[in-house]
Image: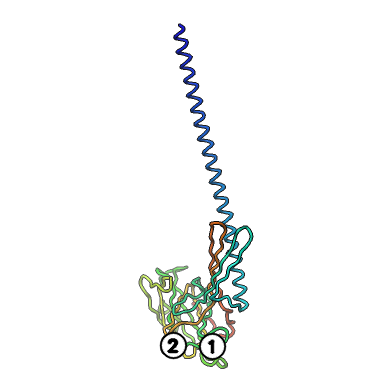
Amino acid sequence: MMNTDMKLKNSQNGQILLIVVLSMVVALSVSLSIASRTISNLRISKQSEESQRAFQAAEAGLERAVRQVSTGGDAVGNGFSGDLTNNTDFSVDIQPESGVDIQLNGGDLVERAVGIDVWMSAYPDYASPYTGQVRLYWGSTGQDCAASGDSYPSALEVLLIYGNKNSPQLYREVFDPCSGRINGSTTVETITGGIEHAGNRYQYRATFPSAGSMTNGLLFKVIPIYNSTRIGLEGLNGALPSQGSVITSTGKSGDTVRKIQYFQSFPQIPNELFPYAIVSQD
C-alpha cells in the first residue's frame, strides 16, 4: 500500500513539473512574441519618423533651389547641400533641361489647350536663335482615333516666333494623327507599338516645320488639342537651348533617404503675344 502511495505521489509530482515547464514555455513564447512585436513597432515608428524627416529635408532643399533659380541665382549646374536639425541634411543638384533630346515640362503632361513654351534661343535675351527643324513626339501607345476619353489621341498646334526679335514673324502649323479631324492639319507618322525617346514611349511623331526649316527661331508654343499629353523634342540641327532647370533634392535622416525631382521652367510667354487662337475642336 505504501509503495502504491509513493508511486502515485511521484506521478503527481511529475505531472505538476510538466505543467510548470509547459506554462513557462508558453509564457516565454508570449513574452518573446510581445517583445518582438514591440521592437518591430519601434523600428517601424523610427523608420516612419526618419522617412518624414528625410522628406521634409528634401522639400527644404527644393524650396531653396527654386528660390535661387527663380531669382537668377548661379546654382544651375552647381549642387549645394545643407544641414538641418535632428541629424537630417539635404543635397541638391540642378541641371539645365537642354540637349538634342529633351522632354518638355520635365516629362510631365503638357496641359490640353494651355501648352508650353519651347525656347529656340537662349533665355532671356533671345541669343543664338535656332535654324533647322525639330521633331515632335507625343501620344501614348494604344490610342485610337475611334476611341474616347484618355485613349483619344491629341493633336498639336505649334506657333513659332522667328526672325529679328525686334520685328519677329509668326508661323503656325497643326499636326493631327486622325485624318479629317482638323481642317488644314498636317498628317503625322503613327508608330505601331510606339517608339522610345528620352525615356518615354510615344506613338506619334512629326517634323516641324513640315516643309523647309525655321530660320532664326526664337521660341514656339506647342499646345495639345483634345487631350493633355507628354511631349518629347529632338533637335535635328544640333542641341536645343535650355528649357529650364531639373532640380533633384535628396533628403537624408539616419539611414533613410528620400528624393524629390522638380522641373522649373522659364516664365511662360503671355498668350496675347500669339495672335492665333487655338483651332476649333469640333
Could you tell me which quadrant the N terminus lies in?
A: top left
Q: Which quarter of the picture shows residue 89? A: bottom right
Q: Position of residue 150 (x, y in %)?
A: 47, 68
- Which mark, by number, is residue 132? 2
Applied colour scheme? rainbow
Q: Residues within 10 Å of mark 2 (few under 14, many from 20)?
A: some
Q: Which quarter of the picture shows residue 145? A: bottom left
Give the residue at mark 1.
Answer: 127
SS type, badge 2: strand
Q: Residue furthest left?
A: 192
Q: Nearest the camera: 80 or 163?
A: 80
Distance Cα–Cα, label 2 vs label 1: 16 Å
Where 39 falls versus 237 (above or below)? above
Q: Position of residue 42 (x, y in %)?
A: 57, 47
Q: Amino acid at mark 2?
A: Gly
Which residue is painted at 44% across and 82% down in the image? 235
Q: Which quarter of the picture shows residue 133? A: bottom left
Q: Position of residue 9 (x, y in %)?
A: 48, 14
Q: Horizontal placement of 123 versus 190: left or right? A: right
Where 184 falls versus 202 (above or below)? below
Q: Amino acid at mark 1?
A: Ala
Q: Nearest the camera: 248 or 129?
A: 248
SS type, badge 1: loop
| 2 or 1: tag closer to the N-terminus | 1
How many numbered marks does the figure carry?
2
Q: Position of residue 144 (x, y in %)?
A: 40, 71
